[in-house]
Image: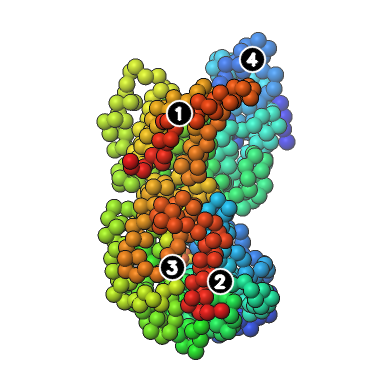
């Protein structure tokens, strides 16, 4: 990953943080520019995301944010630790493409200060369980060789009793995490898909087989792992293809050390459609029956989603009964029709996942 | 410097018009008025290589030529007036009396782009023609200038909405396909919403089936609708949209039809309707209109006794 970075932009204010110098030191042969103001506003949807440039900047807002779920669908009440925005990978379906006014791989250099605040917040709420992830606006580990985020974050989260940290990736950058002596309360997760979708749509990601093999290595190293089949894509032969991924899981993984597997069918903000059409001419992700959901996002017509989920649920459950399978942003009736049960609401799903945390890590 | 002079109408160039951006206009009122009271406002012209170039008054000169009038009064600008100043003079003159149509905006911006950097145009001139200060909007208008005359005519006359054109631009639809759409929109009568849906549906179907728009429109069921002499323009558009919806959303289409059948077989009392909000995403809704409690009770009683109502279910579920 380091090799792909060609240029670094450093916000003037970011020069006051040691994190900035550590990155500059690691990439000392790269061109870097100090910029006084926020990078220019890019409003042209034809912009290039500039995934070969880093932008080191100070994050002004709060570092911990609840996952932006909506009232209309059941949300797991995950919390996002916002360490940076944008990602060196280039998945055709990635929502980040719609934020076209924010190019470059943006890394927040005040993460260490932000982390203190976040940890204080968590420590003040000992009765609550926090499931926290960094992989919402970027891949959690793709930039780890440069940022060493895992080294900054893991020791703090591993020590605490009321939190887990989930590092979600489609890459093989796990050395940083594995080299540390911490395993407690750290979950390394992979986004999975069918091998075909992964090859055609997840540009820059490692193959599904490699992801699963690495997850097996992590399990052997003592980590609890998780998986996210998100986005599930409906296309001809999807059943056979997804089954191939499940077969690989059966071959390389110990199912009793999987904390959860989420399923989410492809959904997108309407603005993303034309961006995908323009940027990924051969993509198949839009080739379905999409309707506007109650949250304003486009999603597959309900019976198609139910077909996707029930198939995946049956196949995964017939491998192992207790995989903590859950749905991401779905309604009560879709849960019931796909799984035969429902957590009823967001609190119910939070309770279900918190219990998984207690089961794997205790309290 | 500017002075008033008598001018031969023939010496005014109406082919080379670097400062004019009038488009899609009708000269009949103007010619009538000139016939009755003569030309009240003399045009402003600029001398260039022994002929006059129109700065302000393009339509007036066309009207004079149409009326075969040989002489007119006109203000002559000195040659030190720069082309940019002339263009802006024409622009502000137009702006003071009317709004530009979308094609005129495109022509003006395109002409302005020869003299001024795009950033300045976006900042200063887009708001003056009621456009947001965005570079992609500016670029879209420059692209509109490159469309065929047929397309520009329909845009200028607002027969095709600017939203539809924007959608085509965002999808990077090739110019030859835009002409096919324009042709279709000229032949059939679509509402603005249908125009957008037409582009969305056809573009989606072509992408899914990996065919070109031309190929899609050659499909028998589509050809039949377009050519059917017994259908009016509006009916053709409606039927075409229905077929495209069926091709694009086969499951949703079937679900809607099946659900409608279920509801129809309930034979609901007048003023009672069952609705499907959000494409079956949320529960169904029943709406009952009534004038008083007695009528409501009567309708509720009939509904409770209606056995068919108990059979209503998600249309994709089997027996
Ligand atoms: S890995 Fe995630 S964040 Fe990165 S491009 Fe793919 S979807 Fe976007």
Establish whether labels 3 and 2 are both on one chain.
Answer: yes
* Gap in angstroms between the C-alphas marked 4 and 2: 77 Å
Kindly check if marks 3 and 1 are in contact, taking CB atoms under 8 A apart as contact. Answer: no
Kindly check if marks 3 and 2 are in contact, taking CB atoms under 8 A apart as contact. Answer: no
Give how far across and how far down residue A7 sits, in percent: 52, 74
* Gap in angstroms between the C-alphas marked 3 and 1: 43 Å
**Dot 2: element:** strand
- Name the residue that disc number 4 marks: B34
Can you tell me whether the CB of the residue at mark 4 lies under 8 Å from the nearest atom of ligand 1?
Answer: no
Give how far across and how far down residue A220 sits, in percent: 38, 84
Which residue appears at 45% of the width and 62% of the height?
A326
Q: With respect to residue A171, does B292 lie above or below?
A: above
The residue lying toward the viewer, choosing from A283 and A308, is A308
- Name the residue that disc number 1 marks: B306
- Name the residue that disc number 2 marks: A132
Establish whether labels 3 and 1 are both on one chain.
Answer: no
Q: In this rendering, would A232 be left or right of B218?
A: right
Give how far across and how far down residue B34 sits, in percent: 64, 15
* Gap in angstroms between the C-alphas marked 3 and 2: 17 Å
Q: Residues within 10 Å of mark 4 (few under 14, many from 20)?
A: some
Can you tell me whether the CB of the residue at mark 3 lies under 8 Å from the nearest atom of ligand 1?
Answer: no
The residue lying toward the viewer, choosing from A89 and A38, is A89
Q: Is residue B293 visible?
A: yes
Establish whether labels 4 and 2 are both on one chain.
Answer: no
Q: In this rendering, would B37 be left or right of A296?
A: right
- Name the residue that disc number 3 marks: A324
Image quadrant in which the N terminus of chain A is located: bottom left
Q: Residues within 10 Å of mark 1 (few under 14, many from 20)?
A: some
């Amino acid at each position: 990953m380091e090799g792909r970075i060609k240029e670094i932009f450093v916000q003037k204010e970011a020069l006051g943080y040691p994190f900035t110098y550590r990155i500059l030191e690691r990439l000392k042969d790269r061109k870097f520019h100090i910029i006084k103001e926020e990078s220019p506003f890019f409003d042209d949807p034809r912009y290039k995301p500039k995934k070969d440039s880093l932008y080191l900047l100070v994050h002004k807002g709060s570092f911990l944010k609840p996952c932006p779920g909506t009232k209309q669908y059941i949300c797991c009440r995950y919390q996002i630790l916002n360490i940076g925005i944008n990602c060196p990978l280039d998945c055709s379906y990635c929502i980040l493409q719609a934020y076209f006014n924010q190019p470059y791989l943006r890394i927040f250099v005040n993460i260490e200060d932000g982390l203190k605040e976040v940890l204080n917040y968590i420590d003040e709420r000992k009765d609550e369980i926090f499931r926290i992830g960094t992989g919402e606006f970027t891949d959690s580990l793709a930039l780890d060789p440069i940022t060493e985020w895992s080294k900054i974050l893991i020791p703090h989260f591993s020590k605490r009793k009321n939190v887990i940290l989930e590092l979600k990736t489609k890459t093989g950058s796990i050395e940083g995490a594995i080299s540390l002596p911490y395993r407690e309360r750290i979950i390394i997760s992979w986004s999975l898909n069918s091998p075909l979708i992964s090859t055609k749509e997840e540009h820059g990601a490692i193959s599904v087989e490699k992801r699963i093999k690495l997850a097996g290595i992590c399990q052997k190293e003592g980590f609890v792992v998780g998986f996210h089949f998100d986005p599930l894509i409906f296309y001809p032969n999807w059943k056979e293809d997804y089954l191939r991924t499940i077969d690989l899981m059966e071959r390389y993984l110990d199912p009793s050390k999987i904390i959860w597997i989420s399923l989410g069918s492809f959904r997108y903000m309407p603005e993303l459609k034309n961006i995908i059409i323009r940027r990924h001419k051969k993509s198949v992700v839009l080739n379905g029956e999409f309707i506007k959901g109650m949250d304003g996002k486009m999603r597959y017509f309900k019976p198609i989603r139910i077909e996707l989920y029930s198939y995946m649920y049956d196949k995964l459950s017939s491998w192992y009964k207790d995989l903590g399978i859950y749905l991401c942003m779905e309604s009560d009736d879709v849960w019931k029709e796909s799984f035969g049960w429902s957590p009823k609401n967001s609190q119910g799903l939070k309770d279900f996942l918190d219990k998984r945390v207690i089961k794997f890590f205790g309290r | 410097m500017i002075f008033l002079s008598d001018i031969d109408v023939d010496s005014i160039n109406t082919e080379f018009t670097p400062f004019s951006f009038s488009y899609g206009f009708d000269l009949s009122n103007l010619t009538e008025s000139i016939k009755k009271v003569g030309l009240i406002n003399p045009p402003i012209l600029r001398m260039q290589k022994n002929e006059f170039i129109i700065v302000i008054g393009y339509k007036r000169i066309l009207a004079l030529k149409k009326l075969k009038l040989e002489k007119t009064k006109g203000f002559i600008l000195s040659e030190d007036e720069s082309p940019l100043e002339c263009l802006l003079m024409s622009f502000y003159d137009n702006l003071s009396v009317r709004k530009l149509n979308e094609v005129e905006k495109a022509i003006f911006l395109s002409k302005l782009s020869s003299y001024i950097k795009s950033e300045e145009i976006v900042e200063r001139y887009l708001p003056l023609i009621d456009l947001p200060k965005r570079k992609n909007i500016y670029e879209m208008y420059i692209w509109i200038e490159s469309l065929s005359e047929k397309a520009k005519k329909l845009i200028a006359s607002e027969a095709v909405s600017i939203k539809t054109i924007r959608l085509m631009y965002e999808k990077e639809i090739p110019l030859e396909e835009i002409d096919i759409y324009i042709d279709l929109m000229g032949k059939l009568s679509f509402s603005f919403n249908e125009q957008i849906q037409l582009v969305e549906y056809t573009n989606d179907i072509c992408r899914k089936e990996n065919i070109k728009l031309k190929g899609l429109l050659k499909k028998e069921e589509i050809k039949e609708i377009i050519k059917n002499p017994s259908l009016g323009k509006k009916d053709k558009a409606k039927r075409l949209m229905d077929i495209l919806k069926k091709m694009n959303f086969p499951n949703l289409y079937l679900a809607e039809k099946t659900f409608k059948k279920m509801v129809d077989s309930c034979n609901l009392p007048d003023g009672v309707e069952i609705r499907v909000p959000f494409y079956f995403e949320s529960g169904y809704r029943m709406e009952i209109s009534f004038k008083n409690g007695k009528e409501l009770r009567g309708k509720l009683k009939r509904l409770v006794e209606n056995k068919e109502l108990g059979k209503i279910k998600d249309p994709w579920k089997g027996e």
